[in-house]
Image (tube, rainbow, N blue to C red):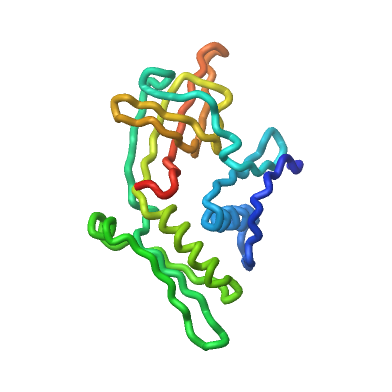
Amino acid sequence: LKLGKLDDTKHAIPGLSENNTKLLDIIYKALDKTLIATKKIYVLFDDFGELTLRDAETMALDFSLGDTSLVYDYKQKRSLDNASNKIKIVRDNKESGKRELYIVQDSRTIAKWGLLQHYQTVDEKVSVEKVKEMLDNLIQLKNREQRSFSIDALGDIRVRAGCYVSINMEELGLNQRFLVNECTHKFDGGVDHTMSLELIDIRIGER
């Protein structure tokens, strides 16, 4: 692959050490860390033979899909599989010889869903201010029920995995953007063009 357009994340990862790990997995882990630090999604993909990294916001499409526009079948799913309503971060302090514990939680969703905890450790080089920022970002990212859609619609070649598309479903009272997680285009006889999309709700800080 040639190197294509690489958007600047403007986030320097403090450090990442991996052994016997695939390069692609390391890149994905770095993008996850960037999401936690910046609350911004970056998409890595093969753009016709060029390895490309784009800010998902720059890939938002200017049209909507819905029950009155292009969509002819859909299924929706709600899940707590990746949700957390208690975030616990541990930071080693070699000077004091103690482990510093930082916690944030949402009592409202704990009462509603039960306790769903996310735990991670950080290097002592990470400042206390940065740890607190991570807590705030993680609770916004993870303290939510994830909604996903499987949609079959008339095709539009502009739609690809990693872009944002607006979904307008009057029947569900839904009008918001979703991230295209998977996209398959089908051409039947060179005339009929349809697409199957897997969409995920990635709004931050909303439950």
- Measured from the top left, where is residue 25 in percent x and y? 59, 55
The answer to which image quadrant residue 110 occupies is bottom left
The residue sitting at 53% across, 72% down in the picture is 128
Residue 49 is left or right of residue 193, and the answer is: right
- Looking at the rendered image, the quarter that the N terminus falls into is top right
Between residues 116 and 176, which one lies in front from this camera angle? Answer: 176
x%, y% of residue 160? 56, 32
The image quarter in which residue 61 lies: top right
Residue 76, quarter of picture: top left
Q: Name the residue furthest left.
A: 111
What x and y, as percent, mark residue 194? 48, 20
Task: Give the camera-side residue of 72 and 11.
Answer: 11
Give the left or right position of residue 42, taking residue 73 as reference: right
Residue under the point 63% across and 41% down: 54
In the figure, 48 relative to 72: above or below?
below
Residue depicted at 49% across the width and 36% down the height: 180
| Count of marks placed on residues | 0
Q: Position of residue 126 (x, y in %)?
A: 58, 71
